[in-house]
Image (tube, rainbow, N blue to C red):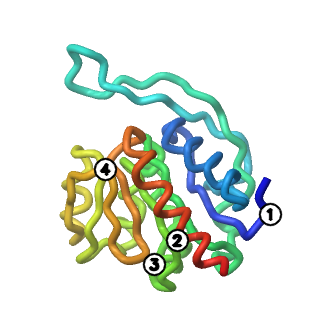
Amino acid sequence: MKPNIGKALIVVGDATETVDTLYPYYRLIEAGITPVVIAPEKRRYQMVLHEIKPGWTITKEWEGYSIEADLAFADVDPDDYLGIFFSGGRAPEYIREDPDLIRITQWFFDNQKPIASVCHGVEIPARADRVRGRRMATVAKCQFDLEICGGIYVNEACVIDGNLVSGRTYHDSGHFVAPWIEMLEAAAN
């Protein structure tokens, strides 16, 4: 087991995508980084599973595991953390208006800290007005959300733009999570 080198935030809400969230959560632990789950309030959140079934043209959703939030957005001092991860699912659409989440998001972008985003997670930095001129991957149906806020959509498994790493969906986790963790490790040193 690696010694602990710091903490990183994972942003969730009800209907956060399970694989989007748990893959980086456990990869952080493997890297010796403590994942700190944050949400609108400190409580248990229901995650979901998303997949486009054969013959379907839209995403089907099932209940996934649940996850406990360690802190409410209002209680987060961003300076205590190495970086932040914006998970996907439907949660970003509902939590992106939270003023404390906007404050936290802007701080990580403005201070050039390691940031990762997957799938619908892009809706949070887009709402926080921090995607202008930034290249990002996201699920294709969020291309509009990114571009209308000034971001540049890239349809690749891993897009790195400075301190920002992104992937399209959980299918890309094996491509974009490791570069983000490498940035966190470098930030810890």
Per the image, the residue denoted by label 1 is: 3
The answer for how far apart the CA atoms under marks 1 and 4 are is: 30 Å
Q: CA distance from mark 3 to mark 1?
A: 27 Å
Residue 29: image location, x then y, percent:
70, 52
Say which residue appears at 30% left-offset and 52% top-offset.
138
| CB within 8 Å, label 2 to label 4 | no
Residue on which disc 2 sits: 183
Question: In the picture provided, is 182 more to the left or to the right than 148?
Answer: right
Image location of residue 43, percent across then percent down: 73, 45
Q: Secondary structure at mark 3?
A: helix
The residue that disc 3 covers is 109
Disc 4 residue type (three-letter) = Ala
- Residue depth check, mark 3 versus mark 2: number of the one nearer the observer: 2
Q: Nearer the viewer, mark 1 or mark 4?
A: 1
To which residue does mark 4 refer?
157
If you read the primary sequence from the N terminus, does the residue marked by circle 3 or circle 4 appear first?
A: 3
Marks 3 and 2, how far apart at CA: 14 Å
Name the spot of residue 156 as percent of width and height, x first. 25, 52
Pick the residue in front: 75 or 158.
Answer: 158
